[in-house]
Amino acid sequence: MTDVPSAASAAGSCGPTTLAFAISADFYRFQKNHMKTTIEIKILFAISTLCLFPFSIPAFAADGKEQAKEMPGNLLSNGDFELRALGSQKPADWIPGNSPAAKCVMEVVTDPSGAHSGTSYLKIQAPESVPVPAFSTKGSIVPEPDTDYEFIVWVRGDGTFRQLVSECAEGKFVSSAGPANLSSASPEWECHTLHYRKPPEIENVRLVLQCAGEIQFDSAWFGPKK
Ligand SMILES: [Ca+2]
């Protein structure tokens, strides 16, 4: 993944030292030649303002680029779990996918030092149950035919989990693609990738996270294989 240059580095040769030297030199010539005109003062002020402008906004420019580069090409909405549903601690654009999931604690936790991406992650507290609680994307995605996809998610916690691609045809759920069994989560963030290719009869898919125990998810990504 290519790093995006920061706003400060993009400012290039228009650095503070160069700027100070240029202004000092101009001011010296200004005094030497006794050209005390209002127009020259205005020109010097305009030059200094234009050169200093990039240094006044690096935080905003860098933040936007950081978010854009974290998960480029992601077809998932709110895969980084940075957004909550209105008036709720639950994540925007994710919903309980079965009745056990509706009874679980599912919340976005803001923890800048603990999040895998951004400042927040999804925490789910789910009991052992049959069926295993499942959490789904709210919207469906239409994968291209004959194209390899990846469903990536970062996971940690105390319990078990798996990621699935829920497949729909003729407006109905027909099958799930993914591992047959749940896996144990690690206490530290680990990346898990599910490879997926849409069968011809499948029209659209939803992405599903299943878990039991206390599991945290972050940086979920679905898109064509990179
Ligand atoms: Ca995040």
Image: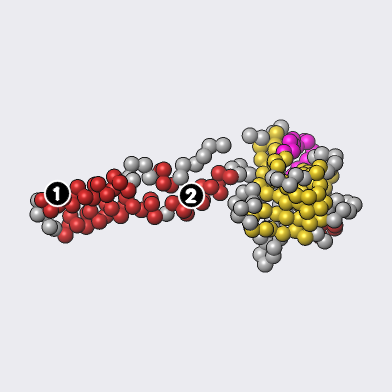
Point out the stretch of residues depicted in magenta: 193-205
Query: Residue 197 appears at what percent x and percent y?
Result: 74, 35
Residue 158 versus residue 196: which sits nearer the camera? 158
Residue that lies at the very extreme toward the top in this rendered image = 146
User: Which structural element holds mark 2?
Assistant: helix
> Which mark is first along the chain, 1 or 2?
1
Q: Is residue 89 above or below residue 207?
A: below
Observer-side mark, 2 or 1, equals 1
Q: Residue at x 51, y 51 (%)?
A: 63
Query: Residue 77 appears at what percent x and percent y?
Result: 65, 51
Residue that mark 2 sits on: 62
Residue that mark 1 sits on: 29
Crowding at dot 2, Cα within 10 Å, few <14 / some 14-19 / many 20+, comes out as some
Q: Which mark is residue 188?
A: none
Residue 75 visible, this angle: no
Distance between mark 2 and mark 1 Cα atoms: 37 Å
Three-letter amino acid code at disc 1?
Answer: Arg
Three-letter amino acid code at disc 2?
Answer: Ala
Count numbered badges in the picture. Answer: 2
Q: Residue at x 16, y 50 (%)?
A: 28
